[in-house]
Image (spheres, rainbow, N blue to C red):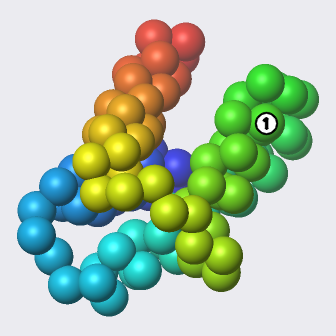
Amino acid sequence: MRIIIKIIISLLLFLCLADMPYGYYQFVRFASCIAFVYFAYQANEKEEKTTSIIYIVLAILFQPFLKISLGRELWNFVDVIVGIGLLVSISRNFKHK
């Protein structure tokens, strides 16, 4: 289930590079925040403190309640880096299994 969520969030983040309506970006922030909180909880359960902290920071960055204004170009950069990071974390999970 985690893999599917990571792929979906990655795709949503990559679609942020396109010219989308503002409501789409709000949805992505909300969905990303929920996913990152879920990932942080799971990492904490596995006692992966560093991974848990990374996901908490991402949840705070993407939270939809207090907008963090970074500008379009910087948000695009963040979206791509986080999307790639999620995909890399999937491949790392396959290597460990």
Q: Residue at x 69, y 57 (%)?
A: 60
Q: Quadrant of residue 23?
A: bottom left
Tell me which amino acid carries mark 1. Ile
Q: Which residue is drawn at 74% across and 48% down?
A: 56
How dense is the environment of label 1, judged by Cα within 10 Å: few (below 14), some, or many (20 and up)? some
In the picture shown, does residue 8 fall above or below 30? above
- Please state the horizontal and vertical placement of residue 47, each as a whole percent of the image: 89, 29
Q: Residue at x 20, y 84 (%)?
A: 21
Q: Which of 43 and 72 is in front in this view?
A: 72
The answer to whether residue 45 is visible is yes
- Please state the horizontal and vertical placement of residue 90, each as a whole percent of the image: 43, 30
Q: For this view, does 21 lie left or right of residue 79? A: left
Q: For this view, does 60 lie left or right of residue 3? A: right
In the picture shown, does residue 46 fall above or below 59? above
The answer to whether residue 79 is visible is no
In the picture shown, does residue 7 fall above or below 22? above
What residue would you read off at disc 1? 53
- Please state the horizontal and vertical placement of residue 41, each as a whole percent of the image: 79, 51
Q: Which residue is drawn at 77% across and 37% down?
A: 52
